[in-house]
Amino acid sequence: MRYINTLHEGETIRCIYLCKGKRSAETRNGKAYDNLILQDKTGTLDGKVWDPNSNGIADYDEMDFIEVFGDVICYNGNLQLNIKQIRKAFEDEYVAADYMPTSEKSVEGMYQELMKYVAQIDNEYLRRAVEYYFKDDAAFIKRFQAHSAAKSVHHGFAGGLLEHTLSIVKMCEYYVGAYPILNKDLLYAAAMYHDIGKTKELSAFPENDYTDDGQLLGHIIIGVEMANDAIRSIPGFPEKLAAELKHCILAHHGELEYGSPKKPALFEAVALSLADNADAKLETMNEIIAGAGDNNGWLGYNRLFESNLRKTSI
């Protein structure tokens, strides 16, 4: 097979990909066409079926594995596949694992490193609250290790939630060293809890899509509910400390317009929101640059960064 990250403009390909998304649309002239999102473990590729009613386009649905035939072009700085033929692939023609994007880092290694930070939490109540999920709940651990941190944008791959969480904890370790007034125990616990709700907000791969709870509640509220469950299991957990942990979770997006019900009111909440924002944006930029391949030119306007982007010249 040809992995998406090896494709180049000007190629004509016949390959099997996961149809991650399918949406019908119309051109300005009213002509119907289909927008597809094709996926393998190396990333995604926009596909266009300009004549969806032609004889070469067989019946298929979203989340089907499909063989596509078409031309690779470059549009607005991004590769796109103009599809001429589609057929639904047979099960013996593909290996599902080849179509699930995964972290390039060792999941087991990352989790062991994360648990070393858990052991550094000196406050008994906060450590037990973290261990409630990260040490004692086998089903949660399995789900957390395999989960993505997002449907798209950043860390949208299996193991992405773990990779993102560990990165946040490491940034918080630096903050604690630079600003000793920060409470290490609260900051570490909040960092580990901040995106815990994504294990219920998003479904597992290959779907990696919003669940009903994800649509109705979102990962921030789900995360606070999960924290409440852990807190209630620990006799004598201080009420004020419980509120401070939950506040950090609620405020970790930093701004109301970014989805946080509260703006940061604690030093630890400010530090957590800055770490989360930094890691999300840096990983997004990393994925954009990696996806550009050999393209050293301008990559087009990006809505997240509100700027045209390109690689550094050196």
Image: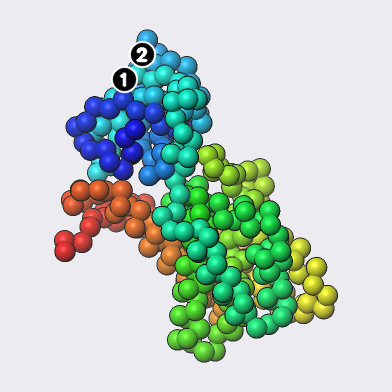
Residue 260, given in percent of the width and then of the height, sits at 58, 62
Give the side of residue 227 with respect to residue 249, left or right. Answer: right
Residue 179, given in percent of the width and then of the height, sits at 48, 87
Nearest the eye: 143 or 224: 143
Tag 1 residue:
84
Task: Pick out the residue farthest to the bottom.
Answer: 180
Tell me if I can see residue 64 in this picture.
Answer: yes
Tag 2 residue:
56
Q: What amino acid is found at the position of numbered circle 1 in the picture?
A: Lys
At a point 65% along the width and 64% down the height, the residue shown is 134
Q: Are marks 1 and 2 in contact (CB under 8 Å)?
A: yes
Q: Is residue 2 above or below residue 117?
A: above
Q: Sequence-wise, which precedes: disc 1 or disc 2?
A: 2
Tell me if I can see residue 246 in this picture.
Answer: no
At a point 43% along the width and 65% down the height, the residue shown is 279
Q: Is residue 87 above or below residue 249?
A: above
How crowded pointer 2 is (Cα within 10 Å; few <14, some 14-19, many 20+) is rated as some
Give the structural element (helix, strand or loop) at label 1. Answer: strand
Image quarter of residue 34? top left
At a point 56% along the width and 74% down the height, the residue shown is 116
Residue 238, given in percent of the width and then of the height, sits at 77, 79
